[in-house]
Image (cartoon, rainbow, N blue to C red):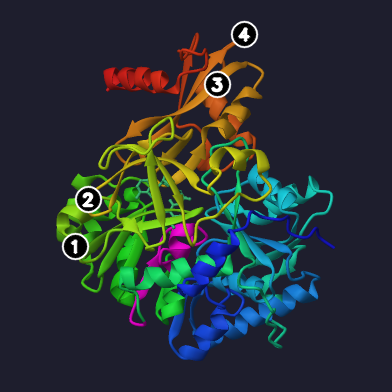
Amino acid sequence: AREPLAPVAQYPPELVTHYRERGYWTDETLAGFITAAAARHPDNEAVVGSDATGAQTRLTYCDLDRRSSAVARGLSGLGVRAGDRVLLQLPNIVEYVEALFGVLKLGALPVFGLPAHRRTEIGYFCQFADVAAYIVADRHGGFDYRALAREVNEGLETPPVVIVAGDPEEFVGFDSLRGYEVPVLADVDPLSVAFLQLSGGTTGVPKLIPRTHADYLYSVRASNPICGVDDSTRMLVVLPAAHNFPMSSPGILGVFHAGGTVVLAPDTMPSTAFGLIESERVTHASLVPPIALAWMAAPSKADHDLSSLRVLGVGGAKFSAEAAARVPTELGCTLQQVFGMAEGLVNYTRLDDTQELIVSTQGRPISPDDEVRVVDDDGALVEPGTTGHLLTRGPYTIRGYYRADAHNAEVFDAEGFYRTGDLVSVTDSGHLIVEGRAKDQINRGGEKVAAEEIENHLLSHPAVHDAAVVAVPDEYLGERTCAVLVISGDAPTVGEIKRYIRGRGVAAYKVPDRVEFVTEFPVTGVGKTSKAALRRVLSESIAAQT
Ligand code: J2J
């Protein structure tokens, strides 16, 4: 038997009552979600995409309901119980949605891995969340996930059962789960934790985010009208489906709630997306800025009929006003900027906002009960329109990370406000403009890299005396990572450092893009490494080189 879920920080009782009275929190759960959707729209097409073998697949809501029940049964047959954690690490294939709803129906908790994660991250999630089952695809993007599973399991005392979509080799085949047909539906408390989502992170190890059924589904339901999602919506999912953005803002869950269709893109190439937009009459898509830029720049745009596209959501990282302004003319759709976070708060520009607001802001909160505070370094509220630290609390923002008391004490204040680490200003209309970031994180085109995590890996190299990872500006990704190193002894080459980090078993997007050597770090008044000064020096030296 696995450990029970550790206790998580609760919302105060008076707010629970308030959120229920306002109708934000309902009895709807993710366990019953797809069965309820199938009852509303049994024969609508729910999902279109490839399966693990590459076969083109179309599932109605009824199909998806039946298949996910079979997965729930199969998992139960393997000994997975309600409350257990199940790590999903699947690419954008139809098995992802079958697995997701299968796990949820059983009352087990998905933990959302990304296809890019490797031994170190996966091993950590398995250990930290005491994962009972780990679901992967056989191969994807030239990588063999069965080999990863083997490596991970070797390092674990109580390894999870591994389930493989495609050729399972010695593991359990995902297809074998489909043999069971009796539906199971766990009786789940809507106020309980539904899953553990991954945080962008600022610390040495990734943080996990416990979201409840009620809080998450409120953000999903409330997103739909803001994003123009209804049963005619056909949404192209290009970003990894397990990311919070394509999952919930309004994402796959929003579309399923409305009875629309999710179209899974097998890769992120603009030509793939354009082909699918044309053939599937796609109406909505959500992208990070670099992919939106790639769409606008792609010559293949002219070869496809993109006229079905109504709304392009762009978020995850700052989209420049200059690029934002070009979206309507170059792609023939409405831009919606999205500034969200897996911890909760999501802001959208509204579809009927002025062009000025759509281009130059990152939107305003979903809920009238989202509280936004902008404070200076000392915690005092700033004058309206002035830049400061964004703090927030509300009906779908967490009150604490999973099993992280010390960190929680730092980033949640006594009133339960979450310190986002983002620097923002607020317009008269209540729209937020992301002005920068106070947290020690690199936003690499929407993929978040916690500086400390990579610094720790670098410091384990015998020749590295000191290490700092900072963002350097990049035209395409917005930011790239730069590792700045103080070396003791023989200096390794840049290639050796990158190979070393890769060899530590981390996601490729975390491997430093640049490596620079210095003899010492600039320090602040209190003798700490000054990353601000480092970033300044680096951008000057990069500017001088180009
Ligand atoms: C600037 N920075 C942004 C934006 C996120 C919807 C959309 C995005 C996410 C997400 C999400 C930004 N401009 N438009 O979960 O539901 C940065 C901020 C933020 C962090 C959160 C969703 N949109 N960011 O990106 O948990 O720094 O969620 O705090 O991955 O991304 O990252 P993440």
The answer for how far apart the CA atoms under marks 4 and 1 are is 55 Å
Residue that label 1 marks:
302
Which of pointers 1 and 3 lies earlier in the amino acid sequence? 1
In the rendered structure, does residue 251 fall within the stretch colored magenta? Answer: yes
Which of pointers 2 and 4 lies earlier in the amino acid sequence? 2
Amino acid at dot 2 = Asp
CA neighbours of label 3 inside 10 A, class few (<14), some (14 to 19), many (20+): many
In the rendered structure, does residue 528 fall within the stretch colored magenta? Answer: no
**Which region of the structure is painted magenta?**
231-252
Residue that label 4 marks:
489
Q: Judging from the image, what secondary structure is the residue with disc 1 in?
A: helix
Residue that label 2 marks:
428
- The answer to whether residue 391 of the structure is visible from this angle is yes
Amino acid at dot 4 = Gly
Q: Nearer the viewer, mark 1 or mark 2?
A: 2
Whether tag 4 and tag 3 are in contact, CB under 8 A, the answer is no
The one nearer the camera, 146 or 35, is 35
Q: Nearer the viewer, mark 4 or mark 1?
A: 4
Whether tag 2 and tag 4 are in contact, CB under 8 A, the answer is no
Residue drawn at 66 percent across, 55 percent down: 8
Side of 334 relative to 254 (left or right): left
Which of pointers 1 and 2 lies earlier in the amino acid sequence? 1
Amino acid at dot 1 = Ala
Whether tag 3 and tag 2 are in contact, CB under 8 A, the answer is no
Residue that label 3 marks:
467
The one nearer the camera, 382 or 159, is 382
Q: Nearer the viewer, mark 3 or mark 2?
A: 2
